Amino acid sequence: MDAPLRESGFEALSAALRRDQERWAIALDGLVLKSVFQPVYSLSHGRPVGHEALVRAFDASGARVASELALRGDASFQHLLRGDRAARMIHALNFAELVGTDPHWLFFNMQAQVFASLATLTSDGFQRALQARCGIQGRQVVLEVLEQEVSADADFDSAARAVRASGGLIAIDDFGAGRSNFDRVWRIAPEIVKLDRSLVRRAALEPQASRIVTQMVSLLHQCGALVLMEGIETQEEACVALDANADLVQGELFGSPQPTLAAPGDTPSALHLLWEHYEARRADAQRRYHERIRPYINAIGYASALLADGKPFAEAVAGFLQLPLAEVCYLLGRDAMQIGDNVWASELHYRERPAFAPMRDTRDAHWARRPYYRRAMEAFGRVQVTRPYRTLHGAHLCVTISVALRTSEGLRVVCGDVGWSGDLA
């Protein structure tokens, strides 16, 4: 066995173990490493389903030092491996004594270089020996790797296969920080993706960012991953997780890192309040939305009645276009092709940008892909309202109100766009 493996081997690290206030700790390069655990809650279950294990490092005087310094050393592979294994050892031993019999995940952070070597670093039997001592099974473990460090080489793929062969799960950490890339998600196919705190913080402040995060969560779900929002500190940030349909949450709002685990059935008061606040906020948003959208629904319905009676299109939609924020109306045929010109409001709340002039003429445009056409055709005679989307006529969002009707010239779909800010309920 070469020197790096000897120094990082199970026997060498076991010799450095010590008991500290009824918990396992380990001595490493003049420092003492200890475990703390932050709970990970399922929003739907309302209870902890796992804990992320974190290292706390202390010098000889008992003063806390940066754990990154203790684990990385000089950043050589030898130091990375030793620090990683030392952390895994104390986390697994402490977790095993605390967890009891309830199914529960243990989240480990792992250096990318160490992760990539998992398939080849089996000769010294470290992992087998650790499992034999603490009793933690592979299926209880979630290995976290920073998204920016996910590699496209064969060793990384082999390591991912090795983790899954042991029954474990893989989580990509800090997704959305810096130059995030969905190719990394497709390549490693993580079971869990942890969204970077910066996304959550921004989404709590900006409606547009909130919509983007919601779409990101949806795409990650379609990739086969559960989504965990971490670093949640406020009620507003927690509401982002609910609105976006995130599966799991973690952060100071629900529990800070502690030497012990949260009780299996524990539902923190913050989670109770979150659901109460969410339901009240959603009910209020629905009320405000219906008050806001009702005039447009009534106006497009009236326009359809006028069209059915044979009124010219511009005359039929005049009432709709007089409403605040109404922008443009247009008429589609059964085949989703636009019939004639757009009819514009005399005053536009959102300034038209000349740079979008190439998109302005939509005569004979084909709108079959648009929800306002498909839904109107599926629910004949009932007014439909889309989610907010980017208009073709500027840099802002709009919603489209539409309804299908029969005229003397055949089936038609009348559509009206309304400039939009904020969210639909």
Image (spheres, grey):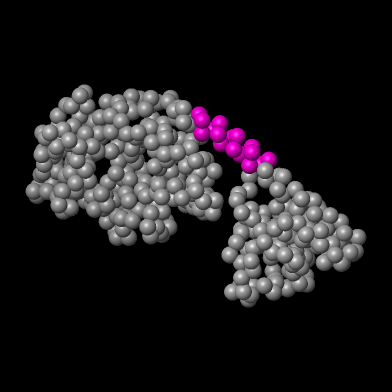
The part of the image, by quadrant, that contains residue 409 is: bottom right
Image coordinates of residue 333 in percent, x first then y, are: 78, 66
Q: Quadrant of the C terminus?
A: top right
Q: Nearer the viewer, residue 205 or 336?
A: 205
- The answer to whether any part of residue 81 appears in the image is no
Nearer the observer, 328 or 223:
328
Q: Main secondary structure of the magenta part?
A: helix
- The answer to whether residue 58 is seen in the rendering is yes
* Residue 363, percent from left and from top: 73, 73
Instruction: Look at the picture and state if 153 lies above or below 31.
Output: below
Tell me the quarter of the picture where residue 93 sits: top left
Q: Which residues are magenta?
A: 272-287
For image coordinates 75% across by 66% down, the residue present is 346
Query: 114 left or right of 354?
Result: left
Residue 183: give x, y in percent of width and height. Answer: 41, 59
| Residue lying at 22% horizontally and 42% vertically, measured from the top left | 67
Q: Eyeballing the image, is 158 above or below 273?
A: below
Q: Is residue 183 left or right of residue 317?
A: left
**In the image, is 183 to the left or to the right of 300?**
left
Tell me, yes or no, whether the highlighted magenta stretch contains residue 279.
yes
- Quadrant in which residue 327 is drawn: bottom right
Is 406 magenta? The answer is no
* Left or right: 262 in relation to 20: right
Q: Position of residue 123 (x, y in %)?
A: 17, 46
